[in-house]
Image: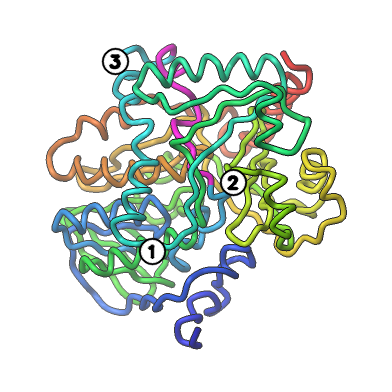
Amino acid sequence: MDAQTKSIFAVDGLAHVESYYADTAHATLPWPQLSESIECDVCIVGAGFTGLSSALFLAEAGYDVVVLEANHVGWGASGRNGGQVVNSYSRDIDVIEDRYGSRTADMLGSMMFEGANIIRQRIDQYAIDCDYRPGCIFAALTPRQLGGLREQRLLWTRYGHTDLQLLDKQEIQQEIATDRYVGGLLDRNGGHVHPLNLALGEANAIRKHGGRIFEQSAVTQIDSGNPALVHTSKGQVRARYVLLAGNAYLGHNLGHKSLPRLGRLSMPCGSQIVATAPLDDATAKSLIPNNYCVEDCNYLLDYFRLSADNRLLYGGGVNYGAKKPLSIDEVILPKLYRTFPQLRGIKIDFRWSGNFLLTLSRMPQFGRLDDNVYYMQGDSGHGVTLTHLAGKLITEMLRGDAERFDAFANLPHMPFLGGRSLQVPFTVLGAAYYSLRDRLGV
């Protein structure tokens, strides 16, 4: 890898975090910094999965697209997450039906497996090398959780997804070398990827369609109007439409009157991951023989998988308000050793954290700030698949078919109790309650 190509990971202190993903990212040409005044059809703020998926769908549809990224492509959650391709939403379809009615549930239910399919289509269409592997297991720690997975299987089958298998205690122990779980649900339509390489591959696909991405180009102000004017420190973009796709890393002091209100409806949260040293083939295969990714069913869940080079990637924990823990090892390693005591003492090569955006309802927030300024955010831990669906929906909407976008945009959202100053302590109290329920199995 030559110095020019590798430079995207170490420029002006804005490098990707020192993660396994950054260390194994594919070579790619750098994107320029915006240093002039330009025009386009759609200006997208943020080069994570939401922005990249939107830009690629729009560019394929013939729109002139500009993406402005404060750091580097995939710098935020999109390049740091667990790489789990998990279907549905952070609240499953039964909760959606109870809260919002059958019509909304039917509309959202018809889309809840689409994001994973889009990811696979992108990988195939653009030959993106991102270590995709099929299969995801939801692992139950208690009989109550296993009962919930039985109900989930029935619900998902009702919406057309039948490639599911319930696992009893013996069967899940054949899939995961631990005695922690009483059963699980295998979703063969889920899977796992190297998320940063997926993001970089999608950015290259945008380049092929004539889309423009500018890195190190943080947005400083958005002026309403038709066209809207989006400012950076060294340039500006005049655009017919603006899409805010920064999620947990979106600033709310950009001069737009509605952005502070948007900030009160969501809360950045941190999650942590470690990556072990590479395991020998026999050990790796003994842990997860069929190379599925796994997440448990706790309210504050753990998730893990094997990388392409046989490392165990293990993540979990939530820091409300995105406050970094003093020690990632102290948060994650007890969980890892409880699941796989046979790995006690294994060398940890990488440890990192990243932020996702949580909403009070755990449902995503789509909407309009002006007639031509849109936002999509708040995937609440299900961002890998939902962001890819979001890109398709914003493209449908701009082309005149807003029905599916509006199915999300019409969901009601309330601010966190106590506003920005008290949202963290109140949420921590709620999380402690649900964590106690998990531990008690009720």
- Residue 95 on the magenta span: yes
Furthest-front residue in view?
Answer: 282
Range shown magenta: 84-98
Badge 1 density bin: few <14, some 14–19, many ≥20, Cα 10 Å:
many
Q: Which residue bears the numbered disc 1?
A: 201
Of callouts 3 and 2, the N-terminal one: 3
Q: Look at the numbered disc 2 and give the secondary structure of its residue.
A: loop
**Residue ID at (42%, 75%):** 28
Left or right of residue 51: residue 210: left
Q: Quadrant of residue 66?
A: bottom left
Query: Disc 1 to disc 2, how far (Cα)?
Result: 23 Å
Q: Which residue bears the numbered disc 3?
A: 103
Q: Look at the numbered disc 1 and give the secondary structure of its residue.
A: helix
Query: Disc 1 to disc 3, how far (Cα)?
Result: 36 Å
Query: Disc 3 to disc 2, how far (Cα)?
Result: 37 Å
Of callouts 1 and 2, the N-terminal one: 1
**Residue ID at (50%, 49%):** 133
Q: Quadrant of the C terminus?
A: top right
Q: Nearer the viewer, mark 3 or mark 2?
A: 2
Q: Amino acid at mark 3?
A: Arg
Q: Which is more toward the observer, 267 or 133?
A: 133
Q: Are marks 1 and 3 in contact (CB under 8 Å)?
A: no
Q: Amino acid at mark 2?
A: Asn
Residue 289's place in the image compared with 63, above or below, is: above
Q: Look at the numbered disc 3 and give the secondary structure of its residue.
A: helix
Whole-percent x and y of residue 80? 56, 56
Residue 327's place in the image compared with 405, above or below, is: below
